[in-house]
Image: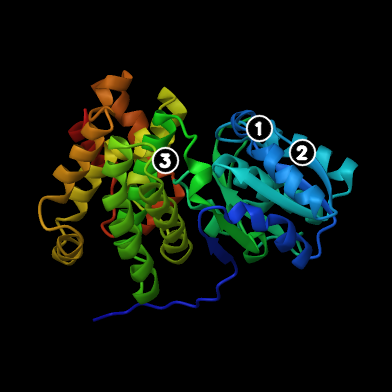
Amino acid sequence: MDLGFFDYQPRTRLIYGNGALNQLGGLTRELGGSRVLIVSDPGIVGAGYVARAETILREAGLEVAVYGEVRENPSTEDVDRCVAVAREFQTDLIIGLGGGSSMDTAKGCNFILTNGGRMQDYWGTGRAARAMLPLIAIPTTAGTGSECQSYALISDAETHVKMACGDPKAAAKIAILDPELTRSQPHRVTVCTGIDAISHALETAVTNRRNALSTVFSREAFRLLHAGFSRVLREPGDVEARGMMLLGAAYAGTAIENSMLGAAHSCANPLTAKFHVVHGEAVGVMLPHIIRFNCALPEIAAIYESYFDGDLPDRVSELLWEARMPRQISDYGVTEADLPVLAEMAMKQWTAQFNPRPLTLEDFAGVYRAAL
């Protein structure tokens, strides 16, 4: 059995448990922070979590500023606005509090604040020459796993191309996983981020960069997410199930860091760009069809059989049904005439190169057609 190559150096300290947010002050002081910038979004500000974090930090004797205007799918403009606040405040530590968009904006701010230039300069891997500020990531959704990744996904405000900007120095020093912070998620956010996390667990399991280490995280992530998702849908206040989702998302994020993603994400991004489909829904609606495509390879089919005793694509479709999410892209207005353009866009997505079964332009069009 080929165990693959990996070079694993944990960069992020994980702290998990109900009430873990209360440790924020002491942890920030451990990292040498004194002037702390909290990066968040209006929903999290409105939920009161930013105020809680501020209080904890101030009680620890720290100066605090807030950038609370993060938007979904942040662009270079969002990052630039955050950088302006950070520079004026002269921050020495950054906290990303919220969903993946808040954590990505915090990372993007860190790149420019410490290394100069603009976000486009860091598109790719390892392009930050200088040290970066300590970052603490506090997810309030169980989805992207950004708290365990060294990449920031930022859209170019002019071209709308989503750039993956990564560097080991951009990884959070500490990730605080507090299940209680996910209880206020609206139902739609819960299902979209949950399906996204499940897709991460399943795609990382089979990429051509998978290895013995990433497999450990992919498998445990799927176990937790699959068990927790239906429970959360039935009982939104089930904190134990929310904890399973939160930890599963973090493990899946760790798997991404060590294995990358595949063609379901390549197919999803064009749906978001062209039809404004929310990312979690876009990945979810394409995932069953990519799994079927990949299972034409016997070794991939065997991996998925070890994850789920049954028809995995059908099971993913069942989860979408439970979440009341569309299971065909025609529901978003996609027609046969749109498929060539979507296929061309999917071919250009960076995750396509990691899919275990290579896709041609015709293959992408065929997968989209199957999803119509």
Which label belongs to residue 45? 1
Secondary structure type for disc 1: helix
Q: Examine the rendered structure and indicate whether residue 60 appears above or below residue 105.
A: below
Residue at screen point 50% across, 34% down: 184
Which label belongs to residue 359? none
Quarter the C terminus occupies: top left
Amino acid type for the residue under numbered disc 2: Val
Amino acid type for the residue under numbered disc 3: Thr
Secondary structure type for disc 2: strand
Label 3 packing within 10 angstroms: few (<14), some (14-19), many (20+) = many
Residue at screen point 59% across, 29% down: 43
Choose the circle earlier in sequence order: 2 or 3.
Answer: 2
Q: Examine the rendered structure and indicate whether residue 246 appears above or below residue 334.
A: below
- Asked if the residues shown at circle 1 and circle 2 are in contact, with their CB atoms under 8 angstroms apart, the answer is yes
Q: CA distance from mark 2 to mark 3?
A: 24 Å
Instruction: Confirm whether residue 130 shows in the render.
Output: no
What percent of the width, then of the height, locates residue 139? 55, 48
What percent of the width, then of the height, locates residue 176? 58, 56
Which label belongs to residue 66? 2
Residue at screen point 75% across, 44% down: 55
Q: Mark 3 — residue?
A: 193
Foreground of the two, 89 or 7 = 89
Secondary structure type for disc 3: helix
- Asked if the residues shown at circle 2 and circle 3 are in contact, with their CB atoms under 8 angstroms apart, the answer is no
What percent of the width, then of the height, locates residue 103? 61, 47
Q: CA distance from mark 3 to mark 1?
A: 19 Å
Displayed quadrant of residue 169: bottom right
Choose the circle earlier in sequence order: 3 or 1.
Answer: 1
Quarter the N terminus occupies: bottom left
Looking at the image, is mark 3 or mark 1 nearer the viewer? 1
Instruction: Confirm whether residue 307 shows in the render.
Output: yes
Judged left or right of residue 241, residue 273 is right
